[in-house]
Structure formats: C-alpha cells, structure tokens
Image (tube, rainbow, N blue to C red):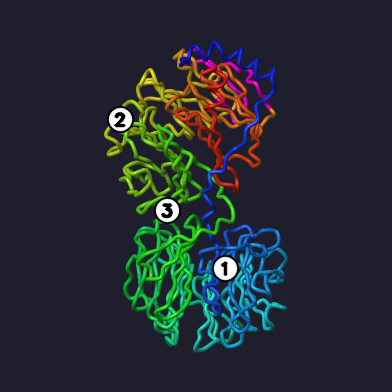
Amino acid sequence: MTRGPLDLLLLLPALLAGCSASGPFVQVWEETGGPYERSISAVLPDNRVAGTLYASPGNGEIAVSTSGGRSWRRAAPIPEGPEIRQLIQDPDSPERLFAATGAGAFVSPDRARSWTSLGVGPSGTGVRVMAIDPWSSAVIYAGTDGKGLYKSPDGGRTWNEINTSRDLLLSGADVYDIGIDLSKPDRVFAAVSPYGIIRSTDAGAHWQGLTPEFSVTGSRATRLLIRRNGQGTLLYGTTSGTIMKTTNGGSSWSPSRTSKDFDGILSLSDFPGTPDSVIAGTERGIILSSDFGTAWRPEGRDLPEIPTRVAIAGEGSHVTLFAFGSGTGLRASGDNGASWRTLELKLGGATVGVLAIDPAGDHLFAAAGNMCMMYTTGSSGAWSEAGPGFRGGDIRALSVDPSVPGRVYATTAAGVSVSTDNGGSWETTPRSMQGSPYLYEAHPAITTRRFMASEQGIFVSTDRGGTWKHSRPPGNQWTVLSLTFSPTNAGTIIGATSGGGVILSLDGGFTWEQARYGIPGDRVESVALDETDPDTFYAYLPDGRCFRSRNKGLEWDPYAPPWKQSDNVRIACDRRAPNSVVALVDNTHVYYSHSGGGTWIRLVDADLHARAVSLCWSAATMTLYAGVREGGVYRLPLGRRIRDLLGE
C-alpha cells in the first residue's frame, strides 16, 4: 500500500511515540570510498632510486612510493602536523631529506622514517623554501616567513642569519624561492617580498636588488629558474602570471610571457639534460617553453584548469613529470605533458564542504576547496573527478539544473562553470554581472530563469543566464545561503541569508523583501515548506532553533523541535521536495519530517564518528549524504527504515 503525504502526517505522532517506546533504531553510515584528499603540497622524486617518490598531502603527512606512484605507504609524519611546503634531497647523501614547513625546517636521516627539527630563525619561524649548494652539500640556504634568509655551513646543525644589505631590510622579508647558479655557486638569487628578485655574489654575505618592488601589474615575484651553464640567463614568474627574463645576470629584464588572466606562476623547472626546455605550473594548469622562455604554449589538455605545480624525475628520454597542487591531486606524464594518469595516494579523505545531487539521486557532486568530484550512486558507486574546462578557485556552490538532465553549475570567485554531461566536461559561462558570484540556481518550474547572488545582491536572468538584471529593491546586498522554491506556486521563492534573516519573493525573483518578523539574529541556515499548507514556512537557525510562519513569512514564532538548543544540529532539505527535511543531531541522531518540520520522527541513531561539515538529502532515494572533516563522504540509506515505519 502506498501512503500519501497526508497519511504520513496523520501517522507521525504515533510513529514518534512508537520510536520512543521501543528505543532508537541503530544504523551504520556507509563509506563511499572517497573523495580522497587531493591537495598535494610537496612532491620529491628520489634522484638516486628510480621509481621512488615522496609526496605530502599536508598536515605533516608524507607518503612514499617505490613503484612510480602505483602504490603508497605512510612514512613518519612531521611532528605536530605542519603544512609541508617543500621536500628536497641531499645530493651527496640521498638518504637525507629536508622539509620546509610552516613550523620550520626538518631533516630526516633515513628517507622519511624519522624527522628532527632544525632551528632556523626564532622559535616558530615558518620556512617556505630550502636550497642546497650543489658543490658543497653542507651549505644549505633557507627562506622564511617574515624573517628573511638563513644559511647553514654544516648540513643544518647551525644556522646564521644572512640578511645583510645596504638598502634592503631583509630581516622582515618573506622568501618564496632560492636559486643557486651551478656555474658560480657563490652567486645566489632569491624571490623575496617585498623586494622582488635579489642577488648575492658572495654566497649570501651581501645582497643587491635586481627588480622593482612590484612589477608594473602590481604582482609579486614567486618563482625563479637559472639556466644551467647559461652565463647569467634566468627567469622569474609572478602572481599575475607574467614571466620575466634576463640574459645578463639581472642587470636588465624583458617580458618572457605576459598574462591578463592572473594565472600566477607556482613552479618553474627545466628538463635535466635539455636546459632550454622549461615547464611552468600556474594557477590554471601548465605551460611549456622549448627555448628557455622566449615562447610559451599551454600543455596538459586533460588536466583541470586549477592551480598546478610540477616536479620532474629522470633525464633525457626517460623523464617523468608529476603535476600536483591544491585540489589537483597527483598525476604523472611520461610524454612531456601530452597525457596524464592519476596517481591516488588514498591516505585520507578530503574535507567536503559542498554537496549537491541530481533530481533522480543518481549523481552526487562534491567540492573540497577547488576540487570537484562526481559520485555515481547505487551499490557499485564510484568516484570520478571533474573533466576538462573547469575554472580554478575554491568552489563556493554546486547546483544541479532540475529541468535539464546532466546540467551542473559550479560557482567560484572567477565565475560560473557549467557542465552538460554530469561533470564530464565544463565551460565557463559569460560573466555579465557585477561582483563575484557565490550562488547560482536554476528555477525548477520556469526553465529559462536563473538566479545568481554576489556581494552586490541578487540577480535574475530570463534567458538561461545570457543576460542579467539586478533584482529589486536596488542595492540589496543580502548574503544568500540557499533558495527554496514553492512546488505549488512558481512565483514564491524563499531565501535563507546571512545578515538578512529570511527574504521572500512572490513574483518569481524579480522583487524581494525581508520576511523575518519574530526571528532573532540575522543568519538563517535553511528554509523548508509544508506541502499541504502553502502558507506555512519553517526557518532553521545555526544554533538548532526552529521558527514557523503560518502566514507566508510575515510573522514567525518559535516552536520546540525534538532536540535541545544546546545540541549540534545540521539540517538538510531537498530543494525539489522542500517539505522533505532531515536533521542530524550531534552527528548521531537522525530525525525526519515530511511536513517541512511541523512534525518529526526519530529515524535512527547512526554515529558518524566525525564532524559533518556538509549534508545533502535526496528525497527521491531517501538517502542522506554527509561530507566530514578530513574523511570524505559517507551515506546513510533511510528508505527501508521509513518504509518499515509506514508499514509499506
């Protein structure tokens, strides 16, 4: 027998009493197998043992592969879990590794089996970069966060500040890169903020500025590369994506590459054995030059357009490239970047902050920073990554078009990317509105209408996002967290905001007004509707309090849910069925309402064993998904439990 919403409403009080009498039903969250953490902060190919590779996914963790990345094992972590920014290897004693981290420099005498702190600078000084003198490996340079440059003459046992300069106050500078001239090891270059590129001709005893403090675009020097045996030829890259070149040791510079997209340079490397071949990692992928920077071309067409750095193993015709970065994961190429394969470390789950699901519940989309992953639901569920064309930047919102199968929107600071094949490929939508968008939604009933929110307010489009106009009243600047659409009246849209409480539109999104009388505070996490009573709305606050309006949002009154105000509560509403709501209380107790929140039943107790940072509820499949901190995504199928309670 199939029961309708009214039947369920009549049964809910009895169901609630029945659950209380018999005790909670215990269920177990299921792991989805991902998405794994794909933010790789440092990669080091072993220069003596082919196939051996070190990689850090952050937080002090280090993984080791002896199979070229096909399988991995955990190495000893850096104490206290700092951000690992760089790994380097002693050229004369390859078992000795050094790590530059946000908590200082560390050394391992045994290929990452143990680590010891090195006292670089005052206590707590972060180290960004290290460089070893190729002619005397006992000499090591270290660049710091805000403390300038340091040098060790004895393999890292002691360190001396080397910030002497007539004109530059290097003792308070941030150092982003260090380069040692192989032909003249006393000649050292550094990329330093706020001084640009500086040079020492006496192994760091004195320094001279070579470039303006900032480039003409206002960008900062980030990376540098000295040509092997190039007699004063070097490149440096900037945060804007510009690359500058000199052939006279820095006396004069000319643009090697200019950029208008601010795709900052994250790494510069040459190919061992072919010094004119250079590869650069940028904020939007990788670029190559075969003439040491005279001309550049994009490469890695199957890499996503997100921040990427590059490490190189081997030499000559046996070179392997490794691409990595924040959300990039780790990929390898054996054909100089023409094609890439993914290498999974699988050392820990990503922190998934945004989740969205398609109307049928077949495809789940997850965002962790600037990484977008897709999950095919069902018993044989599997994760895949976003296809090519995805624009970089942290993902602020994901949404699925309810009227066009396969169409997905991802919102970043750079704009909105759209996929028409469930994330298989992406393209950037034209940016024709003010501000930087943080929310994008398609109207579920009016197929041509789109909504976008930025710091400039709410914008509406009537031609599928081709053109935009500012919603009324002019100058509205509510920070919209979510939009809820009435399933019975296409003109009624309710917004949950941070700073404006609840906002309401009765004309399909062209005009908005605040509808918060009686709601304390300014932030509302989500709004749900009672499908059987179109005048009744429910609003949920971050502290677990619930409010109800029986007159379409004009007035709100508190009502008591089945949890305490002191509990940690997260609410998940299905935007395609806004009367279907799930509450996760203290990461364990799961409550369900089919009336927007008017009446609740306690479905199950299922300890998540981690802190949920995002929830997604599919009313179609009756499955709850949770993105947890450093744990990926878990799912909780609730359909059988709900059907059992209904006696179906």
Residue 273 percent coordinates (x, y): 42, 83
Q: Which residue is mark 3?
A: 392
| Residue visible at 34% across and 61% down in the picture | 301
In terms of depth relative to the viewer, which is nearer, 119 or 594?
594
Is residue 454 at all visible to an observer of this figure?
no
What residue span does the magenta drawing correspond to?
540-565
Number of other residues with Cα within 10 Å of mark 3, as a class: few under 14, some 14 to 19, many 20 or more: many
Camera-near label (3 vs 2) is 2
Camera-near label (3 vs 1) is 1
Q: Which residue is mark 1?
A: 54
In terms of depth relative to the viewer, which is nearer, 447 or 384?
384
| Residue visible at 35% across and 73% down in the picture | 289
Q: Which residue is mark 2?
A: 447
Q: Is residue 591 magenta?
A: no
Element type at mark 2: loop
Residue 76 percent coordinates (x, y): 67, 64
Which amino acid lies under the numbered mark 3 shown in the image of this protein? Gly
Distance from the alpha carbon under mark 3 to that under mark 1 = 26 Å
Element type at mark 1: strand
On the picture, is 350 further left or further right than 568? left
Q: Quadrant of residue 543?
A: top right
Earlier along the polypeptide chain: callout 3 or callout 1?
Answer: 1
Using the image, tell me which numbered label, if any, was put on residue 192. none
Image height check: is 423 above or below 494? Answer: below
Dominant SS in magenta:
loop
In terms of depth relative to the viewer, which is nearer, 48 or 465?
48
| Residue visible at 52% across and 27% down in the picture | 639
Earlier along the polypeptide chain: callout 3 or callout 2?
Answer: 3
Element type at mark 3: loop
Number of other residues with Cα within 10 Å of mark 1, as a class: few under 14, some 14 to 19, many 20 or more: many
Is residue 86 at all visible to an observer of this figure?
yes
